[in-house]
Amino acid sequence: MRRLFLSGLKGGVGTTTILANLATALVQAGESVTCIDLDSKNELRLHFAHAWDNATGWSNLAERAFDEAAFVDQDGVKFIPHGHGDSSLSEKQRMIKTTRNLDCNEDEWVLFDLPSYASAESFELQHDDVLVRVVNCDVNCHSLINQRVFQQTTIPEYLLINRFNGAVDIEVEIARMWRQKLPRVLPVFVHQDEILKEALAYKNVGYNCAPYSVIKDDFQALISWLQMHYAKASP
């Protein structure tokens, strides 16, 4: 099982959009994918043609039942919404642990949408898990990064640049500084593209709505990096 955790360095950087598009790209590449929303905002479902007024999810079902909360979208992405109920840290931890017992093969992708306060320690991630922190090339994220210490830990945090605009000088400069000074900035990034926002109005993902856009290449490049990472990590 390949467990991938996505969390924003702060709120509003596009983490949920990244996860939904990545899941769709993986399924269209022939992979089996399950997405689990651990954020109480309960927004991941909106990208998968889920009924907007259906707030059912694992957080408001008896015994946090997987099967009752799971849905499958038109592309074949299996997703488990958070639901409208509140969930404590311990309940989120239990959900993460439960996925270890899922009946699936070793190549199954399980993608988690974590709230922005998430850390590898608080969510008790395992050594073979991957934590990706989504960032924007702006002063807010740059300031937050300067306040954090990205140390060599059991579960390293990788940074994924989202909404990158190469025509904006300050974004290019910030990206350059991060690549020079930070150890785990991913070699791929997702460009700014309005289709990622517009697709939500159609209850879909930009990966489907813009087949010839640069973002499609971005997500394919991200998949390639992830596959290489897991291949290197395999015994």
Image: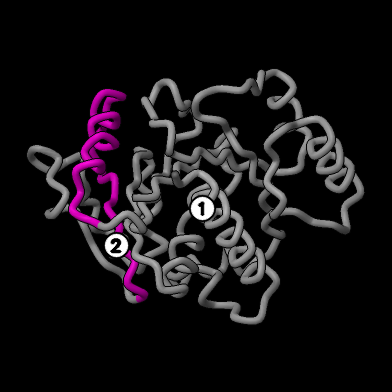
Instruction: Find residue 186 and report its horizontal and vertical position in percent.
Output: 68, 46
Q: In this view, does 233 lie to the left or right of 67?
A: right
Instruction: Find residue 104 and report its horizontal and vertical position in percent.
Output: 23, 56
Instruction: Find residue 168 and report its horizontal and vertical position in percent.
Output: 87, 52
In the structure shown, which secondary structural element does the residue marked by tag 1 occupy?
Answer: helix
In the structure shown, which secondary structural element does the residue marked by tag 2 occupy?
Answer: strand
Q: In the rendered structure, which segment of residues is drawn in magenta?
A: 75-104
The C terminus lies in which quarter of the figure? top left
Is residue 92 rendered magenta in the image?
Answer: yes
The quadrant in which residue 108 appears is bottom left
- Disc nearer the start of the sequence (2/1): 2
Q: Is residue 162 left or right of residue 5?
A: right
Residue drawn at x 25%, y 46% is: 83
Is residue 96 rendered magenta in the image?
Answer: yes
Residue closest to the far front: 235
Q: Name the residue under label 1.
A: 231
Q: Looking at the image, which is closer to me, 103 or 28?
A: 103
Instruction: Find residue 75 and report its horizontal and vertical position in percent.
Output: 36, 75
Q: Name the residue under label 2.
A: 78
Residue 131 disc label: none
Residue drawn at x 44%, y 61% is: 23
Q: Looking at the image, which is closer to me, 231 or 62?
A: 231
| Three-letter residue code for mark 1 | Ala
Residue closest to the far bottom: 212
Q: In this view, does 195 lie to the left or right of 16?
A: right
Q: Is residue 24 left or right of residue 38?
A: right
| Three-letter residue code for mark 2 | Lys
* Residue contact between numbered discs 2 and 1, judged by CB atoms under 8 Å: no
